[in-house]
Amino acid sequence: MFGWLRRVRGFSTPFGGISWGPPTEKPFGVPEFNGTIALTSKENDDVIAFLEKHAGLIVYLNATIDACVATEEQAEFVDSQDLDFGLIESGTFGDKRYELRNNIGKLAYITFTLLPANRRKVSFGGTGVVTLAVRGFFEVVQTAHAGPSLIFHLTENDAPLSAKIEKTNR
């Protein structure tokens, strides 16, 4: 009945000095991952824990995909997995399964289904450094497969402009 009060920023009267402020909760309080998704090294413990905890939800990723081949171990892994750097370097790496190597003993993979209009920008370093930023709202679906393996399917979702601005301009 008084839903319109939520839109009022505040008011006062000369008689009572009444004031009111808007609610402090954020309208787009979605879980947010700020970190790295490593395709060539074992640094995915945090992302696996985050995706397991938020499976079935829409989350906001403010992540860097790390596809570096700066060490011998990373180069050997890339050779053994036949990682397609053409897709990664083009920014159109979606719809392919990537292993989430980790130190917690989980056999986990990640796939991305990206919106067609959102092509990612790739950064290159001088000694095998390849990274790209992934920012956006994704639905997380977790599926179990042969043995103890998990696949996290991340499907990018469009969002209202106000939600994009809130997450980008912090």
Image (cartoon, rainbow, N blue to C red):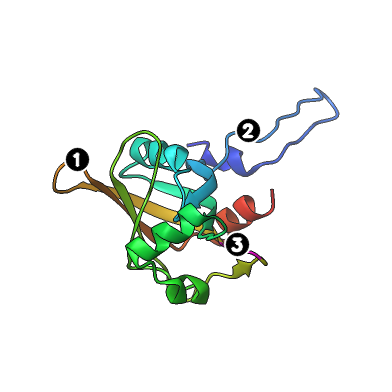
Q: Which residue is mark 1?
A: 148
Amino acid found under the numbered disc labelled 3: Val
The residue tagged with tag 1: helix, strand or loop? Answer: loop
Amino acid found under the numbered disc labelled 1: Pro
Residue 115 in the figure: left or right of residue 164: left
Residue 136 in the figure: left or right of residue 77: right
Q: Residue at x 38, y 67 (%)?
A: 83
Which corner quadrant of the image does residue 106 belong to? top left
Q: Is residue 54 magenta?
A: no
Q: Residues within 10 Å of mark 1 (few under 14, many from 20)?
A: few
Considering only order in the chain, which callout, 1 or 2, is on the residue closer to the N terminus? 2
Q: Which residue is mark 2?
A: 24
The residue tagged with tag 2: helix, strand or loop? Answer: loop
Q: Which mark is nearer the camera, 2 or 1?
A: 1
The residue tagged with tag 3: helix, strand or loop? Answer: loop
Give the magenta-colored segment's residue range: 127-131
Which sits in the foreground, 139 or 2? 139
Q: Which residue is mark 3?
A: 129
Question: CB under 8 Å between callouts 2 and 1?
Answer: no
Q: Residues within 10 Å of mark 3 (few under 14, many from 20)?
A: some
Q: Residue at x 33, y 68 (%)?
A: 95
Q: Residues within 10 Å of mark 2 (few under 14, many from 20)?
A: few
Q: Position of residue 108 (x, y in %)?
A: 30, 46
Q: Position of residue 120 (x, y in %)?
A: 54, 69
Considering only order in the chain, which callout, 1 or 3, is on the residue closer to the N terminus? 3
Considering only order in the chain, which callout, 3 or 2, is on the residue closer to the N terminus? 2
Residue 3 in the figure: left or right of residue 55: right
